[in-house]
Image (spheres, rainbow, N blue to C red):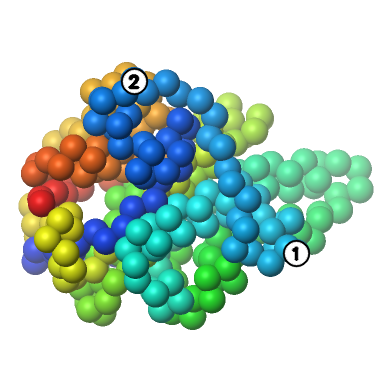
């Protein structure tokens, strides 16, 4: 589920970042809020239409597909790497909560008929499939779920894949909101997505380096937090937003150790350097 625990240092370089969330409309546009240069004020996530999809698939695309394609496209465009040849890792704590709600509602109704589109989108790897359609990517794709640890698990998987296979890798992590009554049990209130294009080799002097330093990368230290109360609330309320401390360190160009939420009692310590 979470990939191998590293026993040797793993180092990769970031070539592109994608970001979309509440009042975070893209990586470039969000850096001022992440660094504190502007005041962050939460507002609903605005999801763009996935124009890279053919019209028929575009009509079927829900929030989980829209956010994952948006951040993936932003990251790959920034990297300058060919989109069709990038292997990928897609990671989400629970997939498409809205679609799950609609299917459960249909099953609880008198006719119990499920829309073929709902069924088609119910599988956890649907965003990966839509990514392949929109990008023409034929490379391998791994799809993970590790509950609230899904960003950390996805990052570990992507870094391991990049180094073992000696290739650039696209990581896409995303979550969408849950309607009631699911929200009362799983209180996800909005959509958040983040994407990284990483590789084992530096391409430009300003590339950010991420390092997992062997067994010491598994830490019992508390997870890093955000110094803005609204951003901290976002970090704790949507699993994919556990990436925020890492994104903040990158936006601030800080050489530091970021502790990411991972498993209960065991966090993931990631070195950030420039």
Crowdedness near tag 2: few (<14), some (14–19) or many (≥20) residues, C-alpha within 10 Å: few
Image coordinates of residue 49 in percent, x first then y, are 63, 50
**Residue 170, percent across and down?**
36, 64
Gap in Å between the C-alphas at discs 1 and 2? 40 Å
Q: Which residue is mark 2?
A: 39
Is 8 positioned to the left or the right of 171 in the image?
left
- Return the x and y of residue 61 as percentages of the image width and height: 67, 55
Above/below status of 165 relative to 189: below
Q: Nearer the viewer, mark 1 or mark 2?
A: 2
Estimate the x, y position of residue 194 in percent, counting from the top left: 39, 48
Which is more toward the observer, 161 or 265? 161
Q: Quadrant of residue 248?
A: top left
Visible in this render: residue 44? yes
- Tell me the residue at 39%/51% (across/down): 18
Answer left or right for 6 relative to 82. left
Query: Which residue is outermost to the right?
Result: 111
- Label 1 secondary element: helix
Q: Which residue is mark 1?
A: 56
Which residue is depicted at the point 52% across and 57% down? 69
Of marks 1 and 2, which one's residue comes earlier in the chain?
A: 2
């Amino acid at each position: 589920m979470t990939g191998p625990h590293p026993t040797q240092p793993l180092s990769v370089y970031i070539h592109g970042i994608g970001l979309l969330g509440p009042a975070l409309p893209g990586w470039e546009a969000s850096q001022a809020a992440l660094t504190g240069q502007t005041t962050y004020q939460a507002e609903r996530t605005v999801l763009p239409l996935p124009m890279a999809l053919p019209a028929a698939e575009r009509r079927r695309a829900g929030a989980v597909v829209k956010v994952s394609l948006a951040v993936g496209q932003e990251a790959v465009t920034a990297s300058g790497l060919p989109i069709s040849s990038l292997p990928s890792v897609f990671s989400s704590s629970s997939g498409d909560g809205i679609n799950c709600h609609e299917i459960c509602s249909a099953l609880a109704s008198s006719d119990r008929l499920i829309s073929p589109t709902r069924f088609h989108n119910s599988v956890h790897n649907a965003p990966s499939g839509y990514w392949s359609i929109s990008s023409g990517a034929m490379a391998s794709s791994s799809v993970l779920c590790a509950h609230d640890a899904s960003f950390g698990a996805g990052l570990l998987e992507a870094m391991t894949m990049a180094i073992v296979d000696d290739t650039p890798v696209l990581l896409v992590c995303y979550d969408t909101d849950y309607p009631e009554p699911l929200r009362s049990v799983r209180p996800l209130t909005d959509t958040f997505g983040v994407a990284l294009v990483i590789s084992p080799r530096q391409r430009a002097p300003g590339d950010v380096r991420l390092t997992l330093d062997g067994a010491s990368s598994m830490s019992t230290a508390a997870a890093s937090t955000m110094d803005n109360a609204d951003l901290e609330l976002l970090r704790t309320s949507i699993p994919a937003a556990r990436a925020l401390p890492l994104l903040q360190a990158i936006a601030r160009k800080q050489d530091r150790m970021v502790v990411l939420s991972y498993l209960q009692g065991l966090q993931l310590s990631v070195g950030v350097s420039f």
